[in-house]
Image: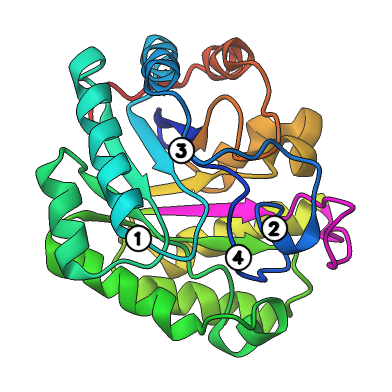
Amino acid sequence: MNKEIFLCSICNINSGTCLEDCKFCSQSVRYKADIDRYKQKDIKRIQEEAITARDNGALGFCLVTADKGLKPKTLEFVCAVAKAVGEVAPELRLIACNGTASVEQLLILKEAGIKAYNHNLETSESFYQEICTTHPWSERYETCQNVNTAGLTLITGGIFGLGETQADRVSMLESLASLNPTSVPINFYHHNEALELEPNSIEIEDAFNLIALTRKLIPNADRIMVAGGRELMFGERQSEIFEHGANSIVIGNYLTTNGRAMNKDLDMLQSLKLEVAKKV
């Protein structure tokens, strides 16, 4: 078991404005989920969240927007936010998660101080059409390739519990491995009653096995991160994720759902005699 755990915090800098029909995502305007919706979060508030994340041990700070991809105004805003965060918390490693992106757009983000880009494949290529019809899986894969071409650190993962088969899970993990990501965030579907999908039916032991399978099939990844759905999926057994190969977690809140208090995660790591990573 890895003794150093990488902590990352997510900042939803634009929320609930996406026009795509991803069935797992409450940020789509199509499903009218009861979430906060705004075009741009106040930059001072983002800076405050960055400082809080840093002070609680986070090394990664991810700037997330809700849209299919990077539009010119979104790109400009993300760059402005990146520079503003860098002024108050230069210790943070800035990550952008803004949908599909070209090499040219990624290079602009890189120049603004972004070090890594997160774009998830979500599921297998064959199952993707069951959960999204407004854009193809191939665009997701291409964006990940663009991240590598641009020289940014690639972060890519997916979601378990969407109704996929075990074969789909293996296929997704093999596709992820082919992209040689540095970090692999795995999420467990957190159901919202406004969405069309059925609630996640994965049993907890199977979820632990999926973490181990991710580590087995993507052995070259520096980090296997358990991200969205951790608290709901594992409950009082969250500490066991590290025994199965995870060495990274998200602290604080997620995009549209609450995480647990940061100090509780820090207390958990301390009780396990695990150290918070101080550098990448």
Mark 1 vs 3: CB contact within 8 A? no
**Helix, strand or loop: magenta stretch:** loop
Lower position in the chain sequence, tag 1 or tag 3: 1
State the residue position of label 1: 71
Can you tell which of label 3 and label 4 is closer to the viewer? 4
The circle on residue 19 is 4
Q: Amino acid at mark 2?
A: Val
Q: CA distance from mark 1 to mark 3?
A: 30 Å
Lower position in the chain sequence, tag 1 or tag 4: 4
Q: Residue at x 39, y 39 (%)?
A: 63
Q: CA distance from mark 1 to mark 2?
A: 18 Å
Badge 1 marks a residue whose secondary structure is loop
Is residue 280 something that shows in the picture? no
Q: CA distance from mark 3 to mark 2?
A: 31 Å
State the residue position of label 2: 29
Mark 2 vs 4: CB contact within 8 A? yes
Lower position in the chain sequence, tag 3 or tag 2: 2
Q: Amino acid at mark 1?
A: Lys
Image x and y of residue 205, in percent? 78, 53
> Which stretch did the figure color magenta?
184-203
Lower position in the chain sequence, tag 2 or tag 4: 4
Q: CA distance from mark 3 to mark 4?
A: 31 Å
State the residue position of label 3: 248
Please name whichever residue, 35 or 178, is drawn nearer the observer in this view of the structure. 35
Q: CA distance from mark 1 to mark 4?
A: 13 Å
Mark 3 vs 4: CB contact within 8 A? no
Is residue 175 something that shows in the picture? yes
* Depicted 164 relative to depicted 237: above or below: below
* Depicted 142 relative to depicted 269: above or below: below
Q: Residue at x 59, y 19 (%)?
A: 265
Can you tell which of label 3 and label 2 is closer to the viewer? 2
